Image: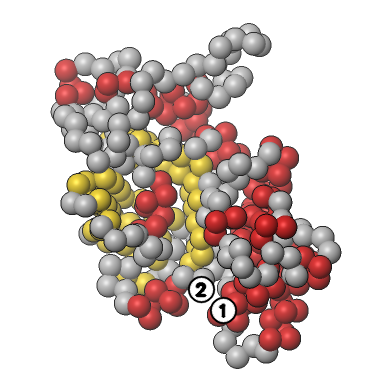
């Protein structure tokens, strides 16, 4: 396994936020993570990269990536992992890029960090190759550009080029198509798939759009209010979701409900519970149409069948 996590919990100022996440990612696999904003997706990614801010603490029984124990990793281990064996694409490339530095300086820095001893001339040549790899025309001219001179799609391509500079074993793409139009979104997703296929890296693709996850992922885990509520093969989960929240996400997609054109979209009533708020029983029960007295007890992940890898946090 490239990534193995068991019982990961995250606290914010001592308050539980993410609760008992267990998951894995195999080499060459795409794991899709889907859920509403505020459910803890990005927080988990930050924990995996060792980038949680002050006041936010993670604990786990096991958290291993690229054969490194993340729970015992020191500063030197993290330097080797970040931008080396592991890379991350942030959801807002304009804030991730340094506005005061050219594309060339930022991209060459990534190349030189990954390939110790390379000359600056060779690093520039590699930067040009990477820009060409991610589909940026007139790469030589773009190296001289500053981030504010780039479109959102182009900036995201720069971030992907920086991420793949070290040929990582695991890439985390945290909502990489946010704020991009549909055409550019499709291009970015296709680019990530081409790179994954060519390099054999594993990919964690995070999105609030279950349609994107269906298109790109092999397996999916659905998060709600700091918990995984369903996981399994992406085709099986979307074709026959077990958890009421997953059913709501699937039904909310245009064209999924079977209603005639111009009908009102299906919605999930209520709003997501803040991840630090403590509740009794199932965290989704106040929004669920099938709730009963059993939902007042905490729900655990259950397998759909003895020989199945599908799990759902619901007694139904």
Residue at image point 67% right, 89% down: 119
Give yes or no for contact between labels 1 and 2 (Cβ–Cβ under 8 Å). yes
In terms of sequence position, does the residue under pointer 1 or pointer 2 come before the other? 2
**Label 2 CA crowd tier, 10 Å (few <14, some 14–19, many 20+):** many
Structural distance between the alpha carbons of marks 1 and 2: 6 Å
**Residue of label 1:** 114
Which label number is shown at residue 56?
Answer: none
| Residue 169 location (% of width, % of height) | 52, 67
**Residue of label 2:** 84
Q: Quadrant of the C terminus?
A: top left
| Residue 313 location (% of width, % of height) | 29, 33
Confirm whether residue 70 shows in the render.
yes
Nearer to the camera, 199 or 275: 275
Relative to 101, 41 lies left or right: left
Confirm whether residue 32 shows in the render.
no
**Label 1 CA crowd tier, 10 Å (few <14, some 14–19, many 20+):** many
Residue at image point 36% right, 21% down: 270
- The picture quadrant where one finds residue 77 is bottom left
């Amino acid at each position: 396994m490239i990534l193995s996590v068991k019982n990961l919990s995250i606290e914010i100022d001592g308050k539980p936020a993410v609760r008992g996440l267990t998951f894995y990612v195999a080499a060459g696999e795409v794991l899709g993570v889907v859920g509403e904003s505020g459910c803890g997706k990005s927080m988990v990614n930050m924990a995996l990269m060792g980038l949680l801010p002050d006041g936010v603490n993670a604990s786990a029984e096991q958290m291993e990536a690229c054969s490194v124990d993340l729970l015992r990793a020191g500063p030197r281990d993290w330097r080797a992992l970040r931008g080396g064996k592991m890379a991350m694409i942030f959801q807002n490339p304009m804030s991730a890029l340094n506005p005061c530095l050219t594309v060339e300086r930022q991209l060459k820095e990534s190349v030189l960090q990954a390939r110790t001893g390379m000359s600056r001339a060779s690093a520039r040549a590699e930067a040009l190759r990477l820009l060409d790899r991610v589909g940026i025309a007139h790469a030589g001219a773009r190296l001289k550009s500053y981030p504010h001179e780039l479109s959102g799609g182009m900036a995201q391509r720069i971030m992907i080029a920086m991420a793949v500079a070290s040929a990582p074993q695991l890439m985390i793409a945290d909502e990489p198509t946010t704020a991009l139009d549909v055409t550019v979104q499709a291009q970015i997703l296709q680019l990530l798939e081409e790179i994954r296929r060519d390099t054999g890296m594993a990919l964690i693709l995070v999105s609030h759009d279950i349609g994107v996850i269906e298109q790109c992922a092999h397996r999916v885990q659905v998060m709600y209010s700091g918990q995984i509520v369903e996981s399994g093969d992406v085709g099986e989960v979307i074709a026959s979701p077990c958890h009421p929240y997953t059913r709501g996400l699937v039904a909310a997609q245009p064209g999924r409900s079977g209603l005639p054109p111009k009908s009102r979209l299906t919605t999930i009533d209520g709003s997501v519970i803040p991840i630090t708020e403590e509740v009794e029983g199932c965290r989704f029960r106040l929004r669920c149409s099938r709730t009963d007295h059993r939902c007042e007890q905490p729900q655990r992940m259950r397998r759909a069948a003895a020989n199945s890898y599908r799990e759902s946090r619901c007694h139904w």
